[in-house]
Image: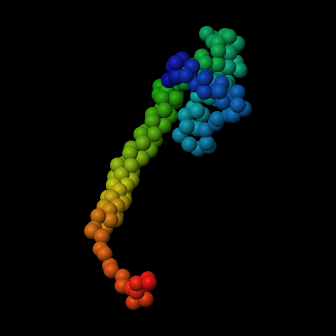
Amino acid sequence: MLRRESVQAAYPLANKLSSRGLLISPAENTPVAVLVGAVLPQANLLFANRKNAPGLEGASYDAMLIEASRAQLPDQSVVHDDRKAEFVQMAKNAITSNLHLARNVVTPKIKAVIEEVNSYVDSQQQSKLNALTISPIFYSSIWDTQIP
């Protein structure tokens, strides 16, 4: 279920986005869309009919969202909680997959590249440390003559 703190936490972002003329909505057929779809239509219906809803007369939209998130199916399961559990599992799988990829694929490749670069740099520095060789150049005899 949604809590007042959760709903209130969304308002600063929503206000900032709306002041810029932006609207966020979840992509269709995604876990976020399913989660939002579990509550939003019911909240809109409650808000439209709040004058006829016992205990919700004059209630804010926050209260309607919270109330809609408590909606139960005939088997007493809470729709929002079921959808949230699916969303959390999907997020957990995505994060776990990304961590696995970073730890077991990306990091070893980066370490291998670093080792190769360091090896190359070391070999280049070693060649610069070698002693200089002197190669005498002998000019033809025209340059050996004395100037009178």
Residue 104 in the image: state x and y as whole percent.
34, 52
- Relative depth, front residue between 109 and 77: 109
**Is 88 located above or below residue 67 in the figure?**
below
Residue 48 in the image: state x and y as whole percent.
71, 20
**Is 137 located above or below residue 67 in the figure?**
below
Taking the spot 70% from the left edge, 12% from the top edge, the residue there is 51
| Number of marks in the rendered image | 0
Taking the spot 39% from the left edge, 89% from the top edge, the residue there is 141
- Relative depth, front residue between 146 and 56: 146
The residue most toward the bottom is: 141
Quadrant for residue 133, please give it. bottom left
Q: Is residue 142 left or right of residue 11?
A: left
The residue most toward the front is: 148
- Relative depth, front residue between 132 and 92: 132
- Relative depth, front residue between 99 and 144: 144
Q: Which color scheme is applied?
A: rainbow
Q: Is residue 19 visible?
A: yes
Taking the spot 66% from the left edge, 30% from the top edge, the residue there is 17
The residue most toward the left is: 131
Q: Is residue 139 visible?
A: no
Of the 4 image quadrants, the one containing the C terminus is: bottom left
Quadrant for residue 139, please give it. bottom left
Taking the spot 32% from the left edge, 65% from the top edge, the residue there is 128
Residue 72 in the image: state x and y as whole percent.
52, 25
**Is 72 located above or below residue 108 in the figure?**
above
Residue 66 in the image: state x and y as whole percent.
56, 20
